[in-house]
Structure formats: structure tokens, C-alpha cells
Amino acid sequence: MLVHLRLTVPDDLTDGVREVLTGHDWITNVTVQPGACVQPPGDLVECDVAKEKANEVLGELDDLGVCDRGGILVTQPTGTPFRAANELEAAAPGHPDDAIIWESVEEQAEDGAVGTVSFQIFLVIAVSLGAIAVINDSAVLVVGAMVVGPEFSAIAAASAGVVLARWGLVGRSLRLLLVSFAFSIAVVTLCALLARPFGLVTVEMVTRPRPNTGFIWHPDWWSFVVALLAGVAGALALSVEKTATMVGVFISVTTVPAAGNLALGLALWQRAEIVGSIEQLVLNVATMVVAGALLLAAQRAWWPWLVTHSERYLGQRSGAR
């Protein structure tokens, strides 16, 4: 798997960029179009790089000043049906599926810390489903609420902010979680209060034994372990861009269902439900942020060494055909 770099390069930096791009055996298709860029003015330089080595190339380009004075666009082709692509992948240590492009991680984290109308609507729907799951003691609805909930993007953004020392990003992520959950819980609490006179929500529905959903407001050591593993899995899926794995993370923790139970507890003023739900919600979010940060920190320190040395145990390189 390759990544394509499209560079806007000031003309006084072009020779240095050309030297960097032609000096490695895991870069190909290097092209230079002098004067092709209008805004900002400069030369257009393009190349294809083995994904495993993209961070190294981007670092060298940054050292030359391309990031500050020019522009860099990173894209991933949908296909590379030529022999040199396989040779490049074979020349780069590790497997492209394990490659991490930290610039991409940082950009995804920045996106995850931005509150949007759609984010808030999804969270309100998810918390509502969680509340309905409690009323009906439905494990299926609990899973549905977890899948719909969008909150992991902000949790992952906080983890990445800690590792990248982007404390503003951490603050924005945590503020988004606090404000969006507070709003969603307030909306569902209001709906429960309006539904109560019609008998749609009663104290007995919330306080009765609930074998299928009682776990969402009873934090214990297993809640901590599950949140820890989910945080690690989610951060790993984010860094190596495994979106399918992220779905598994969404349905492994009870963040959103706990918020739904909290809303019902507030509407019916059931102290035990309120306290237990808050504990579960805070435990899950805090544990996932910490676990994700630890995983990303370990990846920054040891990941290149690990994926390089794993080849002898996990088989041939991806470029071997």
C-alpha cells in the first residue's frame, strides 16, 4: 500500500525536496512541474511513498520547511497495479496495514474535538435509545444505543492530545464531551418528565430488577477492565485506520446507556440510579482516555521497531508476490 504526496514547494526548496524524494528506495513516481503552483507560488512535486515510511518522509520535508512555506497533501490510492508498488512495499520494513501516519492521527483527533449539530443529534438519539432500553430492559436496544453514540471520536481526540502534548486539543475534547452529554441528558430527562404523567415512564420501570440492563449503572472492576480494553482497541483502530474495529469498540462500553439511565434517574429522582450512572459514565470516559493515551504513547516510542521485527514471526512482507 502506497500513499501519494502532492507538494507545493517554493522554488528555492525544490532541489532539496527532489534530493530527499530520490534518495530512498521506497519512493517512486517522483515528478516535478516547475512553476505549476499559483497560490502559493512554487513548483508542483508529486511522488508515491510506501505507507510504512510516510512519517519519515514527512519529517524530512518538514525539516526543509515545506510545511511552513508550501503545502503537503497526503492521499491513499484505491489501487496501485504496477510492479514497482510491490517492490516499494517489500523494501519498506513492516506491513502497510500496521503503518501509522501521525499527521493523519492528529488531523482525525482535531476533527473529533469539534462539536457539530450532527454529533449532538446522534448523541441525543443514542441517549434516548439507552433510556428506552432501561425502560424495556432490552439488551438489543443497549447495543443500538452504543452503536449510534458518536462520543468515542472525542475520547480518542483527548487521548491523542495528551500524547501529542496538544493540551488545547485535550481541553476542547473534554469540553465537547461534558457539554454534549449534559445537553443530551437534559433533553432525555425533559422527555421522561413529559412522558411520566401518561404512565410511559414510572419509578417501578427503572428500579425493578433488570437482568439485561442492570449492568449499565453498576460500575465494578469488570467495568474498568472493559473500558481499559476498549480504550486501547479504539486508539489502535484510530491510529492504523481500522474503522471496522471501531464498531466493535462502540458496542463494548456502556457510556451512552449509562447517560440514558442517568436521565431517567434524574426525571424520577432516584438517587441510587443517579449516583451509579454518573460513576459508570465517568469511569468509562476517564479509563478510555487514559488507556488510549498509553497505547498511542507506546506506539510513538516502540511501534516502528515492533512492526519491523515482527516480520520474521508473521510471514513475508506485503510486497512479496
Image (cartoon, rainbow, N blue to C red):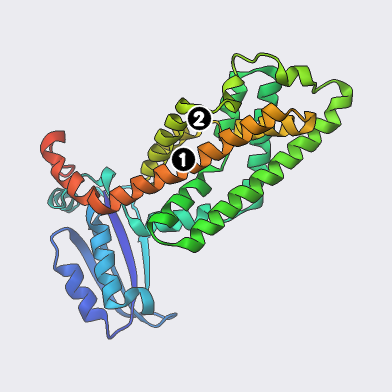
Q: Whole-percent x and y of residue 253?
A: 51, 31
| Side (left or right) of 224 relative to 59 | right
User: Residue beneath label 1, please?
Assistant: 287
Taking depth in this image into account, of 301 and 103 the one nearest to the observer is: 301
Q: Whole-percent x and y of residue 196?
A: 84, 26
Outermost residue to the bottom: 12
Distance of label 2 from label 1 (alpha carbons): 16 Å
Q: Look at discs 2 and 1 and give the one toward the viewer.
A: 1
- Crowd band around label 1 with a 10 angstrom C-alpha radius: few (<14), some (14–19), many (20+): many
The numbered mark, 2 or 1, whose residue comes first in the sequence reads: 2
Asked if residue 70 can be seen in this view, the reply is no
| Side (left or right) of 48 relative to 92 | right
Asked if residue 57 can be seen in this view, the reply is yes
Q: Residue 200 carries which label?
A: none
Q: Which amino acid does label 2 sit on?
A: Ile
User: Residue beneath label 2, please?
Assistant: 251
Q: Which residue is drawn at 75% across and 40% down?
A: 187
Q: Whole-percent x and y of residue 20?
A: 19, 71
Do callouts 2 and 1 mark residues in contact (Cβ within 8 Å)? no
Q: Please determine whether, in this image, residue 32 is positioned above or below residue 245.
A: below
Which corner quadrant holds the C terminus?
top left
Instruction: Say which quarter of the image contains residue 172.
Output: bottom right
Q: What residue type is labelled 1?
A: Thr
Outermost residue to the right: 197
Q: Residue at x 22, y 57 (%)?
A: 53
- Crowd band around label 2 with a 10 angstrom C-alpha radius: few (<14), some (14–19), many (20+): some
SS at circle 2: loop
Taking depth in this image into account, of 219 and 180 the one nearest to the observer is: 219
